[in-house]
Image (cartoon, rainbow, N blue to C red):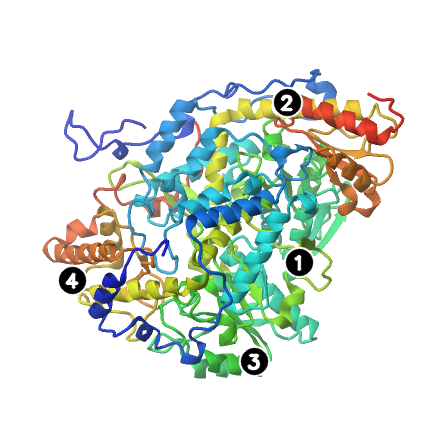
Amino acid sequence: MSGMPVPGAGAGEPVAEWAGDEPLVFELSGDLRGGPREVEPGVPVEALERLLPGVGLRTTPAPIPAVPEPVLARHLGRLARRNHNLHQGIYPLGSCTMKYNPAVDEQLAGLTGFADLHPDQDIDDVQGALQLMWELERLLCEITGMARISLQPAAGAHGEWTGLRMIQAYHAARGDTARTRVLIPDSAHGTNPASAALAGLEVVTVRSNSDGTVDVADLGGRLDRSVAAIMMTNPNTLGVFEKDIMEIARIAHEAGSLLYYDGANLNALVGLARPGDMGFDVVHLNLHKTFSTPHGGGGPGSGPVGVAPALTDFLPVPTVERTGDRFLLNHDRPRSIGKVRAHYGNFGMLVRAYAYIRSYGSTISQVAQDAVLNARYLQARLAPLFPMAVPSDSMHEFVATTRGCRVPELRAIDVAKRLLDYGVYAPTAYFPTTVPEALMFEPTETESKRSLDLLADTCAAIVAEAERDLEHVRSAPHLTPVSRVDEVEAARRPVLRWKPAE
Amino acid sequence: MAYLPNGAAERQQMLEAIGAASVEDLFASVPARLRHPRLNLPPPLAEQDLVTELERLAARNHPLGELDSFLGAGVYRRYVPAIVRAAVARPEFYTAYTPYQAEASQGTLQTIFEFQSMICALTGLEVANASLYDGASAAAEAVMMAVAQTGRHRVVAEADLNPETLSVIRTYARGREVEVVTADGIGHAVGPEDACAVVAQPGFLGTVDDLLPVAEAARAAGAISICCADPIACALLVPPGELGFDIAVGDGQPLGIAPSFGGPHLGFMAVRQELMRRMPGRLVGQTHDHHGRRAYALTLQAREQHIRREKATSNICTNHALTALAATVYMARMGAGGMRRVAEVSVQRAHHLAARLTRLEGIRLAEPDRPYLWEFALRVPGDAEVFAAALRREGIVAGLPLGRVDPRRGDQLLVCCTETTSPASIDRYVAAAARVAEPAGVGA
């Protein structure tokens, strides 16, 4: 496969080195028995058959080749060039909060005193790690207005499910066993209903108003003794603050329901307003969004979940406690929902988030202010090009649509794909599903005005180009390592692993 | 401000373009009484002060490298080749998002495709996903898959599953009113009311049993067979797929990922073809671009939460792509041959240590009749916590006192050797154990 001719390149013409096919590691080596020099055992060696009597040993090696290091290094270097990333350009993905990941946080997470710790070491050997977790919990409680926080969940969705399990345990402990439903707005992230289903709860969808916020009348009509919780994102996925939040909290609590906060959009409010003060009972955070731990191409993230005083008994075990100057792990919590993953959390991510919060400290609300200012500025720049999904003022993100723009046939996917040619990642397209041809932009606070201007100018250039030559936009991208990828084919005939040629 | 690029001049220009008088105006939709709560947060830190502060915290810990450590129990200190760290430190990988826009994400997509292929190769199964959170939650996801597939609500788990794994399975099961029972030798216990049978290779105590009968008994009962497998062991032993298991799950931490106080690690899952559409998590498929060039994309997304919402196979969204990259680079560097040699060195050292320790008075194997790989349960004179504390005073972490997870094993330690456990370290363990176990001074 490698060395395939590249379209557009004449015979003998040089092409960009990333534009050719990059072989798979299985095509770079067939060495199933070699590999790097391994340390000598350094002890008297005995035959494996004698040490492992009756144990079935492999007679043929697993088909994983050892790739010589120089070849592997170049493979990785070439693959790296085939990725958009934050060090190359803006990543304006709505709902994803793709902010800059501070270099120092990577350095600190790699300290031997953090990375080379075993979770089963004696408490006295890990006091610094426990202190960091204890302090991070306090900082996050202060920022969210919650009583306690578990750092255990590995991602946002994991935190959602953990939070819902605590809500179920809370109702069950009160003998209120008929609460089996969760109310979720139609604009919510897909993880909300999926987490509810995983917890064994029934999902009821709540309508939004034309201004993009929850329809309080519709919500009130659905609140009864069967409702365990209302899950909300605030600002919601349209970037609009739920102005009726205090009223929603009041009627929810009056009906015996709890209120759940999806922290995906906390970047709009961090340090400036607290979910706890709005009346939320359970809050999950995405440290890989608001608190700048890197996305890693799809994780690892971290999804701490915080609770109001009435729910602290139900937190996952263990919790981190302090007595005097000593930090402990408390496993003895009989009302806990249990463990939701092994050990204590994605500790490496907790170190990064702790460092991030300490670097801003009491000035952290400037993050929210600049995040909203950047988004509103970008929105103002794009408003002449694309209609906005709702008339309301948005906060840290906004949803535009190509429907009604100057080129009637221009679709969201066309703009998204053409942006890639300009070295700009696409905004989130086709979400929320309540908006046709949606383009959801979230620039974050770490983009400069110059970067926002570049994005706006690029969008303007694409619309102008679509007026002249729609086909060229619709067949984009043209300058990426591969052109538009056939996802239909990928799903119709799934090829999910490499197999040797027959 | 450390990470905010705009100054007062830019902020003013932007406000003018918006038509707002102040930044505060942009927050008008937030009720005034909610705004600007008084927060008790420490003052901001300069980068240099931040580094000093965190280095101070790190220095309060005693990392494994300072000690002679024999801890394992599901988290292993294995050697991480330098190229693994170099790869995951590249911003092209660690600052990228989930690869939704395939054309600008081929690097991540191809490495995930390579990861899936290697996990299939290692486990002997047909379809692997892009990663899950860790081994314990991967096992729980596998159990929920089996419940969905069979419509049954009871799970049989081998009693010597890693206690962390078992406890996470229980948490997931409770939410769905699934009953979890444990048994020794579950080949005899699995029946037609069971959704699945869950075993581990090796078991929590490091032992290796013949698992063929478990897979067969599960199949006969119409249940799904699930094997929690150590990935390095998979390079040495007949893998789960060849033993007839339907699902293999495990933690990829031994594949080039630091212990990091328990996370982030790496969950993996591989299944038989028939279970493909029930899988949780991301899948990357090979396809073509519009010019016919080989390309990769996220696929079969109709299983996932952002499309199916409450009908999705799982709620998982962000998974563990970067640690999966570490594992991919590790496996490509080592190859099947290198991983097998790592396994063999670990086996040789563990058995050598066990042989020398059991020559001491009062010390013997707790499971003398069962073969083991690189971990073994060691019976010591008296309380294992006291024995471990005595060795710790000599800079040796003697293993996990098993009384912490099973009160019946209060006199036992779970002891582990890997290729990072040096022969000199083994000598020190034996000498210290002799002093503690045999105060009179006779010994190995």
Q: Residue at image x 48%, y 53%?
A: A353
What residue sits right under mark 4 in the picture?
A407
Q: Are marks 4 and 1 on the same chain?
A: yes
Q: Amino acid at mark 1?
A: Glu
Q: In the figure, residue A456 lies in which quadrant?
A: bottom left
How many numbered marks does the figure carry?
Answer: 4
Label 2 residue SS: helix
A273 to the left or right of A74: right
Q: Are marks 4 and 3 on the same chain?
A: yes
What residue sits right under mark 1 in the picture?
A321
Label 4 residue SS: loop
Q: Are marks 2 and 4 on the same chain?
A: no
What residue sits right under mark 3 in the picture?
A253
What residue sits right under mark 2 in the picture?
B345
Tell me how far mark 2 sits from mark 3, CA to CA: 61 Å
Between discs 4 and 1, the one toward the N terminus: 1
Return the chain for callout 3: A
Q: Residue at image x 45%, y 51%?
A: A293
Tell me how far mark 4 sits from mark 3, CA to CA: 48 Å
Classify mark 3: residues with Cα within 10 Å, few (<14), some (14-19) or many (20+): some
Q: In the figure, residue A55 lies in which quadrant?
A: top right
Label 1 residue SS: strand
Mark 4 or mark 1, whichever is nearer to me: 1
Does residue A1 appear in the picture of this structure? yes
Q: Amino acid at mark 4?
A: Val
Q: Nearer the viewer, residue B83 or A351?
A: A351
**Quarter that holds the C terminus of chain B:** top right
Q: Amino acid at mark 3?
A: His
